[in-house]
Image: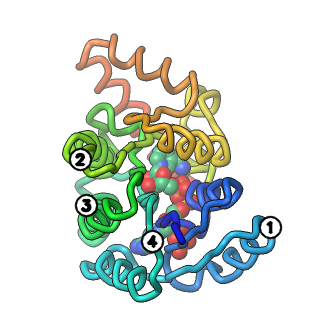
Amino acid sequence: MKYTLITGASMGIGKDIAKYNASLKRNVLLISLPNENLRKLAKEIVSEYGVKVDYKECDLTLNDTPKSIYEWVKSNNYKVDFLINNAGFGGVEVFKDTPYALNNSMIDLNVKAIVNLCHVFIEELEQNQPSFILNTSSMAANFPFPYKTVYGASKSFVKNFTIALSKEVKDLGISVSVVQPGATPTNTVVKDQIELGGTFSKISLYSSEYTAKLAVDQALKKKLIIVPGAKNKLFLRIMKLMPFRMQQNMLANKTKLMFDKINER
Ligand SMILES: NC(=O)c1ccc[n+]([C@@H]2O[C@H](COP(=O)([O-])OP(=O)(O)OC[C@H]3O[C@@H](n4cnc5c(N)ncnc54)[C@H](OP(=O)(O)O)[C@@H]3O)[C@@H](O)[C@H]2O)c1
């Protein structure tokens, strides 16, 4: 029996991705940190959609977690044909003042966990072809992003890694896609950023449900780069037309202003 494995499935975009997969009658494996109600969510999905669901609570910032997820999948004889690397986090920070541990866990989760999960699951996905990988990047991946310095760079990594990987594994029957969400009101950190981030972030909002459905549909249609919504596509075009120095000054000024407002609260 085939399964979609989703990281960061307890809330936000990942939860909506899990529910949308189930609505397509795909069985789902849910991954997120311990004590975040995965058991309850798994029960809800079973009763609402009648698919098979299992879950594993683990910390993806730990080096051995991708291997332990793979071993759990094999020991239960689940066959994964869709790997969705959604777990990730960001924030607005002044790099000089960012705690050492925060930078490291951001890189561990946003970058290392994705590389390692793709790596340990490649053979499994090849065996279960046609198979799919969907990695979650961000609109912030498209340009160096002052005051989201590590986050933006981590998401650029995910985008470039995914594009390169898609070429390498195409002949193994694996289609690889990357989704670049813009502002999506999920957790309180993101909601604060949207509220304080000026007009564009307010008008360019898309819901988590919309982003989840679009990402899954387009990944299953083998689209390589998925940018949710016309407003995000327009924003990207404008940013690319802008002289680089002007673009960087604008991003730095607006994001620093947002940082100051968040810290005044
Ligand atoms: N929301 C946006 O505006 C936006 C924009 C662009 C890109 N994105 C990207 O989209 C993805 C989902 O974002 P979101 O806003 O939906 O996030 P979210 O609501 O904060 O949910 C994050 C999910 O990741 C899980 N997670 C966090 N740290 C983990 C860890 N160490 N190990 C295992 N699981 C962990 C969380 O599990 P727990 O519940 O157990 O903590 C949760 O299920 C992220 O990669 C994010 O960078 C979001």
In the picture of the structure, the residue carrying the numbered disc 2 is 165
In the picture of the structure, the residue carrying the numbered disc 1 is 48
In the picture of the structure, the residue carrying the numbered disc 4 is 79
Q: Dot 4 surroundings within 10 Å: few (below 14), some, or many (20 or more)?
A: some
Observer able to see residue 156: no
Q: Residue at x 39, y 51 (%)?
A: 135
Earlier-in-chain disc, 2 versus 3: 3
Name the disc covering residue 104, or none: none
Q: As rendered, which of 200 and 241 lies closer to the eye?
A: 241
Q: Are marks 1 and 4 in contact (CB under 8 Å)?
A: no
Identify the amino acid type marked 2.
Leu
Q: Dot 1 surroundings within 10 Å: few (below 14), some, or many (20 or more)?
A: few
Q: CA distance from mark 1 to mark 3?
A: 33 Å
Q: CA distance from mark 1 to mark 2?
A: 35 Å
Ligand 1 lies under 8 Å from the Cβ of mark 4: no
**Image position, residue 213 (x, y; %):** 62, 44
Q: Nearer the viewer, mark 1 or mark 4?
A: 4
Name the disc covering residue 115, or none: 3
**Image position, residue 41 (x, y; %):** 69, 74
Earlier-in-chain disc, 4 versus 2: 4
**Would you place residue 110 above or below residue 161 in this image?**
below
Q: CA distance from mark 4 to mark 2?
A: 21 Å
Residue 204 sits in which quadrant?
Answer: top right
Q: Dot 2 surroundings within 10 Å: few (below 14), some, or many (20 or more)?
A: some
